[in-house]
Amino acid sequence: MQGRIIALHLMAINVAIGVDTMVQGALYDWIGARMAVAIGAGTIVVLAAWLVGTRRFDSMDVGTAAS
């Protein structure tokens, strides 16, 4: 069962990479490469801050559960 879950996870990552590439390419054409990369970096920073702020990483510790 664990192998199937990993396979689904990897498939989702590969789909996300393909979709992101198309979106990034459209942004390059529309607003330029420098601004598109800045938007992508800002999105990652905001997402990371949200994950840390909502304590989503606490449940990844071994032997603990999310509260």
Image (tube, grey):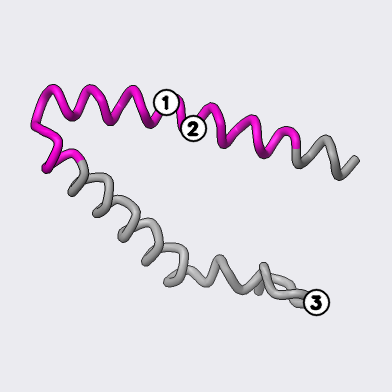
Percent of width and height locating residue 38: 18, 49
The residue labelled by disc 3 is: 63
Percent of width and height locating residue 57: 57, 69
Percent of width and height locating residue 30: 11, 24
> Is residue 39 located in the magenta-colored stretch of the structure?
no
Find numbered disc 3 in the image and state the secondary structure of the residue it sits on: loop
Three-letter amino acid code at the position of disc 1: Val
Report the quarter where the C terminus lies. bottom right
The residue labelled by disc 1 is: 19
Q: Residue at x 49, y 32 (%)?
A: 16
The span picked out in magenta is 7-36
The residue labelled by disc 2 is: 16
Q: Is residue 44 left or right of residue 17?
A: left
Q: Residue at x 38, y 31 (%)?
A: 20
Q: Are marks 2 and 1 in contact (CB under 8 Å)?
A: yes
Report the quarter where the N terminus lies. top right
Three-letter amino acid code at the position of disc 3: Gly
Q: In whole angstroms, how far apart are the C-alphas of marks 2 and 1?
A: 5 Å
Three-letter amino acid code at the position of disc 2: Ala
The first of marks 3 and 1 along the sequence is: 1
Q: Residue at x 65, y 36 (%)?
A: 10
